[in-house]
Image (cartoon, rainbow, N blue to C red):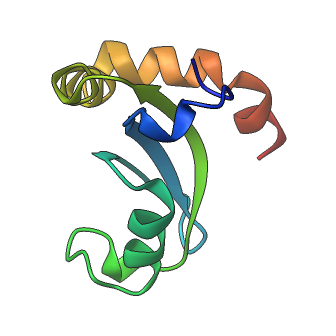
Amino acid sequence: MPGSENSSLIMFFYVYVMESLKNNNSYIGYTENLRKRLKEHNQGKNKSTKLYLLWKLIYYEACLNINDAKRRENYFKTSQGRKLLKRRLKEYFYKN
């Protein structure tokens, strides 16, 4: 269980959504190391995102299985998944 004394043994896979500070574009991905990945995006190490630097993390989910994370990423990239994210982050998008 996260937060227990054995939590360092648990490996999570993260599905994340970032927003560009340049033009409000969004990017959806998955990773094993969320902090490292966000840093890589903001250093221009990803050709899909380097034109729209800087990025901020606006949402993430943690999964115990890599296939679950990949499936969730692919779902978020569909029109139905994007609608879910807009409902899930309604207050965030309303403010912006």
Residue situated in front as seen by the camera: 11 or 87:
11
The residue located at (71%, 23%) in the rendering is 90
Classify 21 as above or below 45.
above
Residue situated in front as seen by the camera: 32 or 54:
32
The residue located at (57%, 17%) in the rendering is 1
Residue situated in front as seen by the camera: 18 or 21:
18
Residue 19, quarter of picture: bottom right
Residue 25 visible? The answer is: no
Residue 30, quarter of picture: top left
Name the residue at the bottom extreme: 43
The answer to whether residue 76 is left or right of residue 71 is: right
Residue 32 visible? The answer is: yes
Classify 4 as above or below 12.
above
Residue situated in front as seen by the camera: 1 or 82:
1
Classify 88 as above or below 31.
above
The residue located at (24%, 75%) in the rendering is 46
Where is residue 83? Give x, y as percent. 46, 17
